[in-house]
Image (cartoon, rainbow, N blue to C red):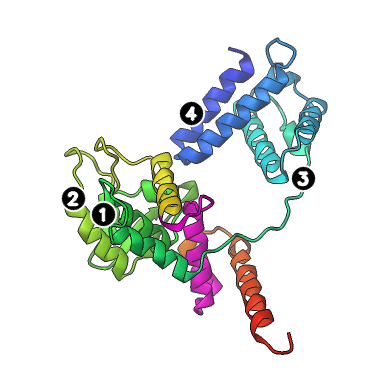
């Protein structure tokens, strides 16, 4: 294995030790493999880290443009490479992070597509009513109730342990990005789903995870995504829905019903208010749509 390949492996191991989400590790792994493949395109090994300069990185970026990759994808790949070079600086392999000099393309300002309350409730009620025969319906219903009822990320959901659930006070302890912890309340429907699921949860005596797979181990990020995708297609007929769709719906519906932005920021675990403010734009867009349809002078 090349010197750069060795350090890529070490960096991915560091991400895992830092409790980065499985989704993040997979994405970075794929981005690094593409980066190494580009640097090895002439059949040899990629250059040593010290030999990679801004010219080589700009040529790599130009190749991404030639492949017609979206701005969002390119920004993620550049961020991955920058983080790798920061790791190389910390390890003393290189003196400066030359990847910082590469400019990221501007991403288009797109608003997240948000389901209506009726659509979300119809989907979740369909699961609870047993419209689809599945071996772990109680678990699946609880997954949806917590994703929508608490607005948590899918990685935060599968990271929940039994000890993180306070059924009496209706709080869950969530471990977010950067190991930051926050408490999030849950409502009566999520409480009812938990009360139905917990007696059916059968894991190994030492298994602390709240959500288990069919083998009795912790449900993975990919497994939970597959569950959400399955019900979204079967019950809603929409293959574009994903776990984050429920997080978007949670925030937008709270804002529409009068919750203040700071409170939503705390519930979502956003580091900055600007990240939460995109939901203001979603609500304004919905408001304009209602105005255009209903106002006689529109």
Q: Are marks 1 and 2 in contact (CB under 8 Å)?
A: yes
Q: CA distance from mark 4 to mark 3?
A: 29 Å
Q: Label for residue 200? A: 2
| Badge 4 element | helix
Instruction: Give the magenta range.
Output: 235-264
Q: CA distance from mark 1 to mark 4?
A: 35 Å
Residue for badge 1: 138
> Mark 1 or 4 closer to N-term?
4
Tag in front: 2 or 3: 2
N-terminal of the pair, mark 4 or mark 3, is 4
Viewer-nearest of discs 1 and 3? 1
Tag 4 residue: 13
**Residue 75 found in image quarter:** top right
Q: Magenta stretch: residue 78 in it? A: no
Q: Which mark is residue 194?
A: none
- Left or right of 72? Residue 120 is left
| Disc 3 secondary structure class | loop
Categorize mark 4 by other alpha carbons within 10 Å: few (<14), some (14-19), many (20+): few
- Residue 105: which disc? 3
Q: Is residue 266 among the parts visible in the rendering?
A: no
From the image, state whether disc 4 or disc 3 is nearer to you.
3
Mark-to-mark CA distance, 1 and 2: 8 Å
Is 238 colored magenta in this rendering?
yes
């Amino acid at each position: 294995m090349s010197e750069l390949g060795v350090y890529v492996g070490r960096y991915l191991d560091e991400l895992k030790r830092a409790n980065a989400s499985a989704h993040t590790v997979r994405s970075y792994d794929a981005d690094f493999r593409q980066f190494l493949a580009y640097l090895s395109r002439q059949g040899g090994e990629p250059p040593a880290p010290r030999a990679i300069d801004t010219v080589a990185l700009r040529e790599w970026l130009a190749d991404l443009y030639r492949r017609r990759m979206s701005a969002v994808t390119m920004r993620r790949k550049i961020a991955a490479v920058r983080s790798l070079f920061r790791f190389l600086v910390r390890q003393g392999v290189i003196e400066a992070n030359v990847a910082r000099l590469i400019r990221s393309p501007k991403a288009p300002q797109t608003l997240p597509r948000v389901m209506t309350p009726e659509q979300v409730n119809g989907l979740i009620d369909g699961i609870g009513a047993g419209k689809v025969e599945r071996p772990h319906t109680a678990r699946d219903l609880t997954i949806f109730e917590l994703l929508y009822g608490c607005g948590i990320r899918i990685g935060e959901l599968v990271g929940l342990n039994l000890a993180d659930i306070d059924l009496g006070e209706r709080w869950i302890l969530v471990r977010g990005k950067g190991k930051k912890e926050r408490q999030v309340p849950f409502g009566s429907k999520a409480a009812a789903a938990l009360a139905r699921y917990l007696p059916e949860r059968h894991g190994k005596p030492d298994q602390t995870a709240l959500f288990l797979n069919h083998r009795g181990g912790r449900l993975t990020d990919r497994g939970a995504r597959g569950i959400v995708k399955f019900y979204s297609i079967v019950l809603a007929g929409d293959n574009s829905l994903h776990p984050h769709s429920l997080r978007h719906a949670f925030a937008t519906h709270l804002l529409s019903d009068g919750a203040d932005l700071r409170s939503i920021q705390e519930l979502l675990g956003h580091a900055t208010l600007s990240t939460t403010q995109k939901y203001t734009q979603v609500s304004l867009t919905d408001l304009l749509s209602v105005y255009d349809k209903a106002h006689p002078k529109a």
